[in-house]
Amino acid sequence: MGFKDEINREKAALLSTKRPYETVAFILFSVLFIYQILVLLLRASQFFFKASVGWFNLGGTVLPPFFARIVGLDSTSKFYALLAFAALFVFYFLIYVLVFNYSKKNGNAKWTWTLIVVFAPLYIGNIFFIHPYILYAVYVFRVYFFRFIKTVIEEYKAFDLAKHNEKEEAINKELEKDYMETQDDESEVEA
């Protein structure tokens, strides 16, 4: 299947009414990604073609934080700027492989999860104070997560406090009896 066929298939999937939120997520992702790329191109052209201009912090609203951290090591070095671009490329490659393809293969909302994982740390993550990777991991492993929760709830319901207290009292009596025997043995030894 060629690239053009893949685009046509994706277009047909987005225009279907089965998942209208996927179309919205695709549009939002496209707008934010294009905005990010345009800002990067503008800043890169200023940095690489004007020798007196150093790379400056773009803030947390445009780029992933690791980009600013890498460039921040030395904002006048072209090496760190290229390294940051390479890291950004690797980041998007990993997002494609680990989020987009995984969601696509498993029938999940691929554009929605890609949007959340890429841009939620920049825009939404500070509101809920939870990293979206955690939300994605819970979503992906929801079967195991909820199976664990179900097991905990079933064990809690099966727990009988009266039987537990009886066992604990029996253990305490036995420990007390052993302690008393030990004290008696020690008093006999001293006498």
Image: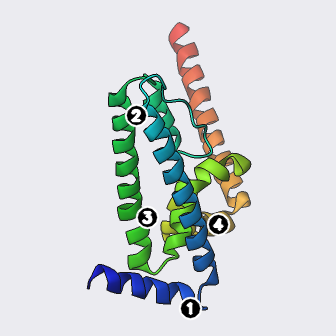
* Mark 4: secondary structure: helix
Q: Position of residue 186 (x, y in %)?
A: 54, 16
Q: Position of residue 74 (x, y in %)?
A: 43, 22
User: Tag 2 or tag 4, which sits nearer the N-term?
Assistant: 2
User: Tag 3 or tag 1, which sits nearer the N-term?
Assistant: 1
Give 78 or 25, whichever is nearer the viewer.
Answer: 78
Pointer 3 residue: 99
Residue ID at (44%, 73%): 103
Residue ID at (54%, 8%): 190
Q: Report the amino acid beneath label 3.
A: Val
Pointer 4 residue: 153
Asked if the residues shown at circle 1 and circle 3 are in contact, with their CB atoms under 8 angstroms apart, the answer is no
Q: Position of residue 115 (x, y in %)?
A: 55, 63
Mark 3–mark 4 distance (CA, rounded to whole Å): 31 Å
User: Tag 3 or tag 2, which sits nearer the N-term?
Assistant: 2
Mark 1–mark 4 distance (CA, rounded to whole Å): 40 Å
Asked if the residues shown at circle 1 and circle 4 are in contact, with their CB atoms under 8 angstroms apart, the answer is no
Pointer 2 residue: 49
Residue 138 appearing in the image: no
* Mark 3: secondary structure: helix
Mark 2–mark 1 distance (CA, rounded to whole Å): 45 Å
Q: Residues within 10 Å of mark 3 (few under 14, many from 20)?
A: many
User: Tag 1 or tag 2, which sits nearer the N-term?
Assistant: 1
Q: Which mark is residue 16?
A: 1
Place residue 21 in its image quadrant: bottom right
